[in-house]
Image: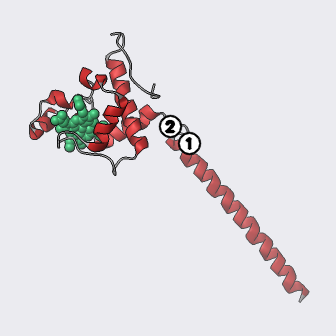
Amino acid sequence: MRVKSGFGRAAGFLALAGAVLAGGIACAEGKNAATAKGAAPDPTLAGAKVFQTNCVTCHAASATGNPAMASAFGVDVALMNLTSSRVRQLTDTQVTDIIRNGKAGKMPAWKGQLNDDQIADVVAYLRSLEAKKYAGKGGKTHGVGHD
Ligand code: HEC
């Protein structure tokens, strides 16, 4: 009787120790995963990923528009240039709106596919491209909270 209950306690202790240990490992793994992804994500970097995954086919890696896609859509490639002075004149809200709802039945609507954070990130990324392109050329900057 005594031996049995002693064994029970020991087993209970081992199970507890095991659970704590496993919990500790799981926790450490979680931390590593977060670090690998970037603990405090830079919206511009996150936006670059969103852009590369979803927009490059039509807007090209440079965001100046893919000429082949422009002719497929029957639009001037200039309309697909996201580093244009036209896009630069749009407010973040206007650009966000175009990305969410699409444009002219050609630019697809991304709401439902990209969440608000991803759209804000990709807008920040586009602004960073504009900032590079127009650096030193004076002019105003947009960016409500993205700069
Ligand atoms: C299937 C092709 C396609 C994809 C994918 C696409 N776009 Fe477009 N986009 C277009 C076309 C075509 C236009 C031009 C529409 C027009 O003005 O006639 C456009 C226009 C735009 C405009 C407006 C430019 C302006 O001057 O008004 C923005 C902003 C834009 N796209 C952002 C994006 C972003 C960000 C993504 C990725 C999340 C994306 N697009 C993915 C085809 C695409």
Name the residue at 86% across, 83% down.
5
Kindly tell me whether residue 56 is visible in this rendering. no
Q: Amino acid at mark 2?
A: Pro
Q: Nearest the camera: 130 or 14? A: 130
Q: Name the quarter showing ligand 1.
A: top left
Q: Nearer the viewer, mark 1 or mark 2?
A: 2
90, above or below 55, in the image: above
The residue positioned farthest toward the bottom in the image shown: 1
Name the residue at 28% across, 43% down.
101
Point out the tag, 1 or 2, that comes first from the N-terminus.
1
For this view, does 124 lie left or right of residue 28? left
Q: Amino acid at mark 1?
A: Thr
Residues at marks 1 and 2, CA–CA distance in whole angstroms: 10 Å
132, above or below 108, in the image: above
According to the image, label 1 marks what residue? Answer: 35
Picture quarter with the N terminus: bottom right
Residue 41 is marked as 2
Q: Position of residue 71 (x, y in %)?
A: 9, 36
Residue 131: quadrant of the picture: top left
